[in-house]
Amino acid sequence: MVRKLAMLMLIMAGLARVSGQEVYVHVSNERIYDFLDELANQKMITLNSVVKPYTRKYVYNKFSEALDAVNAGEVLTIRQQNELEHYLDYYAFGNRSSYLPSKSHVNLFRKSNRLSTSIEHLSFFYSDSFFNFSLRPVLGINHFRNSSGDYTHTYRGLEAFASVGKYLALYADLRDNTVDQRLVLPSYFTQEPAGIYKGNVQGRGWDFSEMRGGILLSWDFLQVGAVKDHPVWGNNYNGATILSGRMPSVPMIRLHVSPVKWLDFNYFHAWLVSDVVDSTLTYLLPGGQHRDTYENKFMVANMFTVIPVLGLNLSFGNSIIYSDQSVNLAYLIPVFFYKSVDHTLTSYKIINQNSQMFIDFSARLLKNTHFFLTAYWDDFATGRIFDPGVHNFYSYKLGGRVSNWPLQNVSITGEYFRSVPANYRHYVPTLTYESNSYNLGHYLRDNSQEVFVSVDFKPVPRLFARYSYTSARHGNEYVYETWAGVTEYPVLQDDTWTSVRHSLVCSYEFLTNCHLTLEYLYSNVKGHDADGRTAQYYLDRFTPEFFQGKKHTLMFRMNIGF
């Protein structure tokens, strides 16, 4: 297997280089992200995992880096060698000039050296020295069953990406979704992706669509583009703390700069959906209906990552959500501390915008290990640090993973999350940490706690099994209509909602990006009487009826593409 990998590298080394496909690999492609994390934990590659999604070029470069390590004497398991060969073949497309994946076993264009149809990768490919293009279908079904009944989610669509010359790349992903009941709403504690539903017509289910994509220009040290996607910020294995990516995709201008090996910089300016009606721009249609227009809402964020030694990434950044104005030039400057900008642009007599700060420490200094700490502040004052009666608005996640030690092909993961009251919230409706009313941060939002433990097993190539345990709780729902008294709210004083989940999942990637997944889930989700509200009130608020109480749920998923 090592010999085959080396031969593949030699073949690709003889091809002329192109700039590469700077199009994003969606975060739902968990197996790719897990495999890269595994290679980084073994110190086969270096990885900055605080900002996702990665680009195809980045993924390809990291797999090439792993192959270089193998050629230098590092050892992979047979399973890892097989997966590395498979993924290198797929991600080399677009990152090598005139390269068609070698696994095109069924090729409808046998007389052409520029066209191929690969069954193994389930894609159509075109490649020459100037233009690369790929098209693949997207199709999936999720079916759940428990004592509440059945749930079915189907989706279908197309995914395409292309590169033109050395610097330009484009991608697009369109899918239509149909669900027979809504298991995802803004108030629910769930990590399932959000959707903006169209009405349930004659009991035929709820539909929603998702369009992602973008256009990017890239050089060796710089990438800039306009995209609509799901940003995920903060190291995690079970839900990000800074940006979770579970909201509907948002349009944004993105900038990535990596001028030297020890510095990495990310920035975006996003157009959010406020869901707050602008009454001055609302008018009546001839039929008597309202034509509603929403208030403007924007978000900017930056993240600096400093790498003092290989394996240690120190990241820090800040963001701001601003509204009730057009795009402000000051927030288009990527390297600013935006809270200070806000204080300049708005006087003390005017309500400020909503700013945030965050840090992320990621350590892969010991072979086979990854430890991290992510902290997020919605509001911070040094005077509160030493006052036991008040608190800053913060959340944090502490976690780690041990990969392939002491047992090969086994990983053990643990995480702890905690947030205090009023974090991720704001009393001005247009300044909330939300888009389309979905929270941008951790799925449990404020005044919550979670413990997550998992054991992953990968016995053969592209077969994945996991047992996981999750214990989560949410505290009091405090009123946050003015600033007064918010910093004094007790943290997790009373439980309003608790959840215990045991999950056993097995997934096989039968073709590239095509998975067959079976899962058994035991869950016990409860509401609790608190603050004059009944347990059922909180249960209905945070959990769909399908998962309320004790449930043994069987889940079947099959997807072609993501």
Image: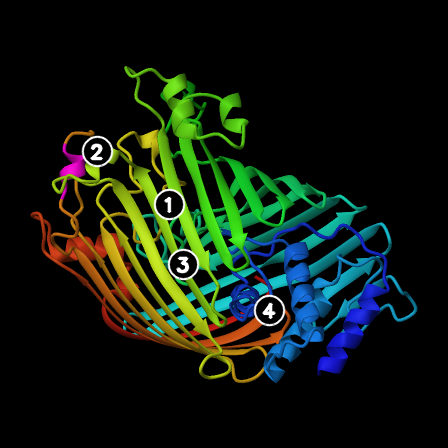
Q: Amino acid at mark 3?
A: Phe
Q: Earlier in the sequence, mark 1 or mark 4?
A: 4
487 falls in the magenta region: yes
Q: Amino acid at mark 2?
A: Gly
- Which residue lies under the disc numbered 3? 372
Quarter of the view holding residue 105: bottom right
259 falls in the magenta region: no
Quarter of the view holding residue 60: bottom right
Question: Which mark is on residue 383?
Answer: 2
Check contact, mark 4 vs mark 3: CB within 8 A: no
SS under mark 2: helix
What stretch of residues is rendered in magenta? 485-489
Q: Quadrant of the N terminus?
A: bottom right
- Residue 288 appears in the picture as rendered: no
SS under mark 1: strand
Q: Nearer the viewer, residue 323 or 117?
A: 323
Answer with left or right where residue 152 lies relative to residue 547.
right
Question: Which mark is on residue 438?
Answer: 1
